[in-house]
Image (tube, rainbow, N blue to C red):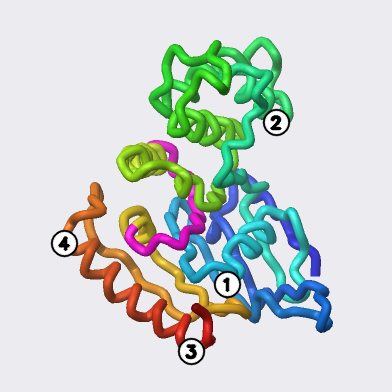
Amino acid sequence: MATTLAKADGAETVEHAARIEHVSKSFAGPAGQQLVLDDITLDVAPGEFVTLLGASGCGKSTLLNLVAGLDDPSSGSITTDGRPALMFQEHALFPWLTAGKNIELALKLGGVPKSDRRERAERLLELVRLKGSYGKRVHELSGGMRQRVALARALAQDARLLLMDEPFAALDAITRDVLHDELTRIWKETGVSVLFVTHNVREAVRLAQRVILLSSRPGRVAREWTVGIPQPRRIEDAPVAELSLEITEVLRGEIRRHGQH
């Protein structure tokens, strides 16, 4: 069943930023159809920050691509409040454009008049704390700065739902921690809903209001946790470490149960 993208009317009450109902996904393989996701049902509320966690190959990125509308589920349905914005592990910036022009391209595709694009791009760079970087080329930016530009470009799409596929995985620990703070701040300031894929348990607990654990392939919702730890949180905070340990033990059990690693 094809993914449904339903943009809510401004006068309506939006109940879900994303609703995933009984979604399964199979791919053709040498031994026939391989089931990757099996009967996933999951809601993301407006303004909610949800992390998807699981072992490598459990279907986290596949599910995110389905929510983004890049592929269709084999069965089930996905409804989102408008078209989501997607941010990948790699920044995917165009190296021949400046930071500002990369953002302006997203604004152009979104129908923003040319006369307004520069100002909007400057405001978005300021939001991600890159004021004054409009004219910098990609090669002049550090890895963390490139991800900030990629985040600004995603926000330029004016989406109500931001999909993030391990966007900080390639960064060093300190840069990643700083960007955790920045993402939390931007999420609070903008009210955007976030569905964030990671294999890092502490990152999941550090960021999310709710953590969803997918089982090993085929991916199913194995468990979920509501994270009641007040923000701001630190990776090294005792409550974060305690909940991370609990989730890690469940994850290890899932991996052992499916005979992986």
Judged left or right of residue 253, residue 60 is right
Q: Are marks 2 and 4 in contact (CB under 8 Å)?
A: no
Q: Position of residue 34 (x, y in %)?
A: 75, 79
**Is 256 drawn above or below residue 37 in the view shown?**
below
Among all residues in the image, which is located at the extreme bottom? 257
Q: Are marks 1 and 4 in contact (CB under 8 Å)?
A: no
Distance between mark 4 and mark 3 Cα atoms: 29 Å
Q: Are marks 4 and 3 in contact (CB under 8 Å)?
A: no
Most foreground residue, 85 or 44: 85
Most foreground residue, 79 or 155: 155
Q: Position of residue 95 (x, y in %)?
A: 65, 24
The amino acid marked with disc number 3 is Arg
Task: Locate residue 253: give its quadrant.
Answer: bottom left
Q: Which mark is residue 238?
A: 4
Residue beneath disc 2: 110
Nearest to the eye among marks 2 and 4: give it. Answer: 4
Among all residues in the image, which is located at the extreme front? 261
Distance between mark 1 and mark 4 Cα atoms: 28 Å
Distance between mark 2 and mark 3 Cα atoms: 46 Å
Element at label 4: helix
Earlier residue among tags 1 and 2 = 1
Element at label 2: loop
- Residue at image position (37%, 80%) is 250
Judged left or right of residue 194, residue 209 is left
* Residue 188 lies in the magenta-colored region: no
Residue beneath disc 3: 257
Magenta residues, start to end: 189-202
Q: Position of residue 27 (x, y in %)?
A: 78, 72
The amino acid marked with disc number 2 is Gly
- Residue at image position (57%, 22%) is 138
Nearest to the eye among marks 1 and 2: give it. Answer: 1
Q: Which mark is residue 4?
A: none
